Amino acid sequence: MSDHILETRDLTKEFKGFTAVQEVNLQVQRGAIHALIGPNGAGKTTVFNLLTKFLPPTRGTILFNGSDITREKPADIALRGIIRSFQISAVFPNLTPLENVRLALQRATGTSYHFWKSDRILRKLDGRAMELLEWVGLVDLADEITGELAYGRKRALEIATTLALDPELMLLDEPTQGMGAEDVEKITSLIRTVSANRTILMVEHNLKVVSTLADRITVLQRGSILAEGTYDEVSQNPQVLEAYMGSAHA
């Protein structure tokens, strides 16, 4: 099996009169944390939408574990083990953290939407749900109402629900967006922990988080790859400094 779990070849997305992503050739190493960075409008979220099939590519090929998934549907992509989190928290606010994770486990075990199942049957999932909540530091809040949790805790819960689906490749879209310094540190540490035995592709604006976590970085500008390499390599690239780093430190 190739060392690259995910690969794109000439991936392109055109809208009327506008090319959002242009001939992007991305290679994500198995077991790595790979970051996509770039200024606003660089095409990062569009790439994520193409990978998870929320948008169909205009041209190009997407390979996952060597298989061509370019024309597959979003549900099929998820079944392959590619699971995405979003820029905003995507959990059920009126349920408890335990219930949120249990719902995700229902999907993973093939009992999705079986709401007529007895409580006794569903509670067989509680042990694993509590393990996941402990992983993300939420076990003491398992029975609280999710909507009342602090923002950083909601993002941690979203990571727990993502892990419940047993992803082989996690796509994290701005996991620390809108967080204070303390929550950013907690989520950064959590991402490092959950990266064991899985691959993470993340979009992230916080360069401290990127420098701490990423094994490899791809810099996008105007829909095209501007540079690739380690943080030290891309942070010293004059084109990157002009296009992204400089503006970030201005």
Image: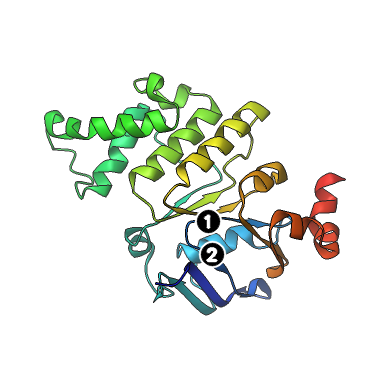
- Disc 2 is placed on an element classified as strand
> Gap in Å between the C-alphas at discs 1 and 2?
7 Å
| Rendered-image quadrant of the C terminus | top right
Residue at 28% x, 36% y is 102
Residue 88 in picture, x, y percent from top left: 54, 41
Residue drawn at the location 71% of the way across and 46% of the way down = 207
Q: Secondary structure at mark 1?
A: loop
Mark 1 near mark 2, Cβ–Cβ under 8 Å?
A: yes
Would you say 109 lies left or right of 204 here?
Answer: left
Q: Image quarter for residue 133? A: top left
* Residue 132 place in picture, x, y as percent: 36, 34
Q: Position of residue 36 (x, y in %)?
A: 63, 58
> Which residue lies at the image location 24% right of the left edge and 30% below the top edge?
126
Q: Amino acid at mark 2?
A: Val
Q: Which residue is mark 2?
A: 28
Residue 3 versus residue 199: which sits nearer the camera? 3
- Find residue 224 and report its image quarter: bottom right
The amino acid type found where label 1 is placed reads Ala
Q: Residues within 10 Å of mark 1 (few under 14, many from 20)?
A: many
Q: Is residue 95 visible?
A: no
Q: Which residue is mark 1?
A: 32
